[in-house]
Image (cartoon, grey):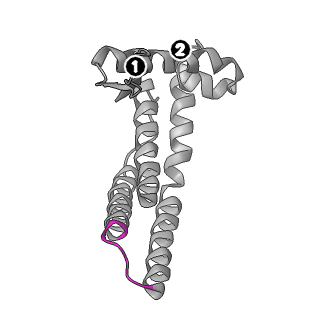
Amino acid sequence: MIHIEASPVAGDDKPIEEPMKPWMLRSMLTRAGDLLRSGSRRFPRALAIALGFVAADPDYAGRLRAAQIGAIVRLTPLTMTASCLNAAILLATIESMGEVRPALWLWSLLVFALAFYYGRNWLAGMRRDAEPPATLRAVRRAIIHADCLAGCGAFCRY
């Protein structure tokens, strides 16, 4: 909801709540994209090329994106193991202090499910041939997957 300050009418000092309209969300996303593009001059060149902010030879950009995604994929088992260990330690610690809330059980289940999903995908990816050049879509999907894992951690706070 967007809060709009009411006009100063006698006795009416409550803000008016107006539901967010689709064009408002589109406008915010456009502004966020413009902000990222304007700040892209401060990004390392390899990151700016991978995100498509800087023009580069398509073959070079594809190989660069593939190398970046390959580095992430190579660390997937370590990251998932650390996440599962973190969830297990947190559950054991809270269980020793008292009752564990259902939201924490749900969060840990989500962490273990994501670890299983990404571990299975990692094993399937190990059977594939050499890395083909990666597209901009592949980088966007990697960012979305990272956001999903980070969102899992943020869920635990609430």
At label 2, the amino acid type is Asp
Q: Quadrant of the C terminus?
A: bottom left
- Which amino acid, by three-letter code, is at mark 1? Ala
Asked if the stretch drawn in magenta spans residue 6, the answer is: no
Vertical relation: 86 (above or below) 137? below
| Front tag of 1 and 2 | 1
Mark 2, other Cα within 10 Å: few <14 / some 14–19 / many ≥20: few
Please name whichever residue, 96 or 76, is drawn nearer the observer in this view of the structure: 96
- First of labels 1, 2 by sequence position: 1
| Residue on which the image places disc 1 | 10
Question: Between 57 and 6, which is closer to the camera in this rendering?
Answer: 6
153 with respect to 117 (left or right): right
Q: Residues within 10 Å of mark 1 (few under 14, many from 20)?
A: few
Residues in magenta, as a range: 98-104
Quadrant hosting residue 14? top left
101 in the magenta segment: yes
**Mark 2 secondary-structure assignment:** helix
Residue displayed at 58% across by 11% down:
55
Residue 117 horizontal/vertical position (percent): 32, 57
Residue 60 location in percent, x, y?
57, 21
What residue is at 43 percent from the left and 21 percent from the top?
5
Residue at the front extreme, as displayed: 10
The CA distance from mark 1 to mark 2 is 41 Å
Q: Quick check: 7 left or right of 67?
A: left
Q: Position of residue 151 (x, y in %)?
A: 42, 49
Q: Nearer the viewer, residue 18 or 111?
A: 18
- Above or below residue 44? Residue 117 is below
Name the residue that disc number 2 marks. 34
Q: Is disc 1 placed on a helix, strand or loop? A: loop
Rendered-image quadrant of the N terminus: top left
